[in-house]
Amino acid sequence: MIEANCAVETESERQSRWPEIEAALEKGVAAIWKSYSLSPMPIYLYHRACFLRMLGMKKEARELFTAFIIRQSGYKTDDISKVLVEYEGSNVEQALLHATREA
């Protein structure tokens, strides 16, 4: 959603709004990390990696994309985690494909 909104802005408009965008992304990182601490599902590593990539933290993002791929390969989904992933609208298979390209 943030990337889509940025695509219609000029570079100077985006730069002028960067502090606002950066603050929203940092809040997203914190929220995802809190979610992961409560329920350590691999998909949360993927989401955090995406936010870090948008913040320009490419090395950290690659590390988390790789961690997501590794953790997801051995992850056993239970009923609760399945419902959580469906509720948030994540597509784990699509996330794995994207993470593989980014890692």
Image (cartoon, rainbow, N blue to C red):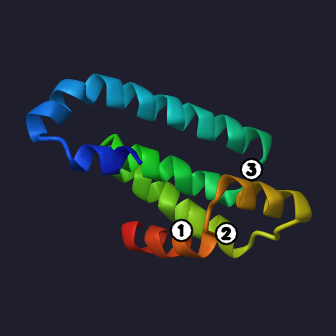
Q: Quadrant of residue 38?
A: top right
Can you give x and y, in whole percent of width and height, for residue 47 in the image? 54, 52
State the residue position of label 3: 40
The residue tagged with tag 1: helix, strand or loop?
Answer: helix
Quadrant assignment, res 11: top left
Could you say where residue 42 lies in the image, as x and y percent from the top left? 67, 59
Looking at the rendered structure, which numbered label has been put on residue 95? 1
Label 2, secondary structure: give it.
Answer: helix
Residue appearing at x 48%, y 51% in the figure: 49
Residue at x 25%, y 29% (from the top left corner)? 18
Identify the amino acid type marked 2. Answer: Gln
In the structure shown, which secondary structural element does the residue marked by tag 3 occupy? loop
Residue beneath disc 2? 72
First in sequence, mark 3 or 2: give its number. Answer: 3
Q: Amino acid at mark 1?
A: Ala
Question: Label 2 neighbourhood size at 10 Å, few (<14), some (14-19), many (20+)?
Answer: some
**Alpha-carbon span between mark 2 and mark 1:** 10 Å
Are circles 2 and 1 on residues that touch, CB within 8 Å?
A: yes
What amino acid type is highlighted by mark number 3? Pro
Q: Is residue 26 left or right of residue 90?
A: left
